C-alpha cells in the first residue's frame, strides 16, 4: 500500500505544476489592466507604468510565473490589489464556508442518490424505476443558477420556510447556520444526486447478475442479507470513485451557488476578484480550488485501492 501511495503522489506533482502554469497563464491573458484596480480609472499613463514596474507586471510572463510559484510554495500569496489584505488570510477566512457547503451538499447527494439508485435497480422496469429515472434526467439537466432561483422562490418566498440568502457562522448559531446553508447545499446536492443514482443503479444491476448472488439466493439466505453483504459491498465500489470526482464538481458549483445565495465562501470571493481584476486573489483562489480537487481525487484513489486490492496491484505495475 505504501508503494501505491508513493507512486500516486509522484504522479500528482507534475499535474500540480502543469495546472499552476495553466491557471497563471489564463488569468494573465484576461483583458484589462490590473493597475487600474490599484490606482483607479483616472490614473495617468505614467502612474500606471510606475505601478506595473512596482508590481512586476512589466516583466516576461514566465519570469512572473516562476516568481509567483516560488512565493506560493513558500506560503506567500501576496496582497490583494483591491483591499491590500493578505491573500492567504482572505482564502483561509473563506475556505471553511465552502467546505461546509460542499460537505452538506455531499450528504444530501448521498442520502438521495444511493437509496434512489438501489431502489431503482431492485425494482427495475417498474413505475418506481421510471419515476426515479425521470427525476434524474430533469435534475441533471437543470443549471445551478436556475435551480437556486427556483428554490428561493419556492421555499423562501412562496412557503416562507427558509431565508433566501446570508450566512451566520456555525460557532455563533448552529441552527441559524443550517437554516441559511440548506438552500445552497440543496442546490448543489440535487445536481449531483442524479449522477450517483445512475451509477448506483448500474452497479447494482451488474452485481445482481453475478454467480455469487444467485448462489447466495439458492442457499436460502434472506434477501436483506444478500443485498447488504453481497450486493452493496461490491456495487458501491464504483460509486466511491464517482463521489470523489463529483467533489470537484461541487466546489465548482459552489462558485455560482455562493453568488446566488450571498454565501461568503471561496466561490463568491473569486467572482468578486474577477470583477475587480484582482489578479493575486483570482490566481491563488483558483489554484487552491484545483489543489483541493487533486487532493480529493488522490484520497479517492487511495480509498478505492484499499477497498479493492485488485486495483492496487494493477496500478503498482
Image (tube, grey):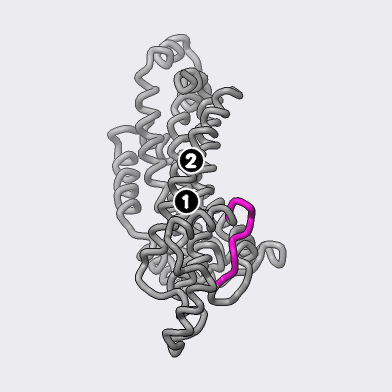
Q: Residue at x 52, y 60 (%)?
A: 285
For the stretch drawn in magenta, what is the main secondary structure?
Answer: loop
The answer to whether residue 157 shows anywhere in this view is: no
- Which of discs 1 and 2 lies nearer the camera? The answer is 1
Query: Where on the picture, by quarter, is residue 181?
Result: bottom right
Q: Secondary structure at mark 2?
A: helix
- Inspect the magenta stretch and tell me whether residue 78 lies in it: yes
Q: Secondary structure at mark 1?
A: helix
Residue 94 in the image: state x and y as whole percent: 59, 63
- In this orientation, which residue lies closer to the viewer: 129 or 17? 17
**Label 2 CA crowd tier, 10 Å (few <14, some 14–19, many 20+):** many
Residue 33 in the image: state x and y as whole percent: 41, 75
**In the image, residue 58 above or below residue 246:** below
| Count of marks overlaid on the render | 2
The answer to whether residue 87 shows anywhere in this view is: yes
Q: Please give the range of residues in magenta.
A: 72-80
Tell me the number on the disc at residue 296: none
Which residue is the site of mark 2? 244
**In the image, residue 230 above or below residue 15:** above
Q: Residue at x 59, y 56 (%)?
A: 71
**In the image, residue 219 above or below residue 68:** above
Q: On the picture, is 84 further left or further right than 140?
A: right
Q: On the picture, is 294 further left or further right than 153?
A: right
Residue 232 in the image: state x and y as whole percent: 48, 27
Which residue is the site of mark 1? 20
Q: What quarter of the picture does the N terminus occupy?
A: top right
Amino acid at each position: 500500500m505504501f508503494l501505491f501511495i508513493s507512486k500516486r503522489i509522484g504522479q500528482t506533482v507534475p499535474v500540480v505544476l502543469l495546472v499552476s502554469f495553466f491557471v497563471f497563464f489564463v488569468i494573465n491573458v484576461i483583458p484589462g489592466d490590473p493597475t487600474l484596480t490599484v490606482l483607479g480609472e483616472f490614473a495617468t499613463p505614467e502612474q500606471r507604468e510606475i505601478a506595473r514596474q512596482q508590481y512586476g507586471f512589466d516583466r516576461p510572463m514566465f519570469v512572473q510565473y516562476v516568481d509567483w510559484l516560488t512565493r506560493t510554495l513558500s506560503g506567500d500569496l501576496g496582497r490583494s490589489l483591491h483591499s491590500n489584505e493578505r491573500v492567504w488570510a482572505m482564502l483561509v477566512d473563506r475556505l471553511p464556508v465552502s467546505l461546509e457547503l460542499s460537505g452538506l451538499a455531499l450528504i444530501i447527494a448521498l442520502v438521495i442518490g444511493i437509496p434512489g439508485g438501489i431502489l431503482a435497480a431492485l425494482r427495475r422496469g417498474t413505475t418506481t424505476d421510471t419515476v426515479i429515472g425521470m427525476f434524474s434526467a430533469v435534475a441533471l439537466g437543470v443549471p445551478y443558477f436556475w435551480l437556486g432561483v427556483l428554490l428561493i422562490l419556492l421555499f423562501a418566498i412562496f412557503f416562507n420556510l427558509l431565508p433566501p440568502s446570508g450566512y451566520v457562522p456555525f460557532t455563533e448559531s448552529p441552527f441559524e447556520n443550517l437554516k441559511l446553508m440548506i438552500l445552497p447545499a440543496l442546490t448543489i446536492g440535487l445536481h449531483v444526486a442524479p449522477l450517483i443514482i445512475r451509477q448506483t443503479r448500474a452497479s447494482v444491476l451488474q452485481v445482481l447478475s453475478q454467480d455469487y448472488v444467485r448462489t447466495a439466493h439458492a442457499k436460502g439466505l434472506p434477501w436483506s442479507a444478500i443485498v447488504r453483504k453481497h450486493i452493496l459491498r461490491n456495487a458501491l465500489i464504483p460509486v466511491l470513485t464517482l463521489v470523489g470526482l463529483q467533489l470537484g464538481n461541487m466546489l465548482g458549483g459552489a462558485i455560482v451557488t455562493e453568488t446566488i445565495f450571498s454565501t461568503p465562501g471561496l466561490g463568491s470571493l473569486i467572482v468578486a476578484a474577477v470583477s475587480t481584476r484582482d489578479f493575486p486573489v483570482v490566481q491563488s483562489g483558483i489554484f487552491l480550488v484545483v489543489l483541493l480537487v487533486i487532493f480529493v481525487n488522490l484520497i479517492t484513489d487511495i480509498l478505492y485501492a484499499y477497498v479493492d486490492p485488485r486495483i492496487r496491484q494493477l496500478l503498482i505495475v
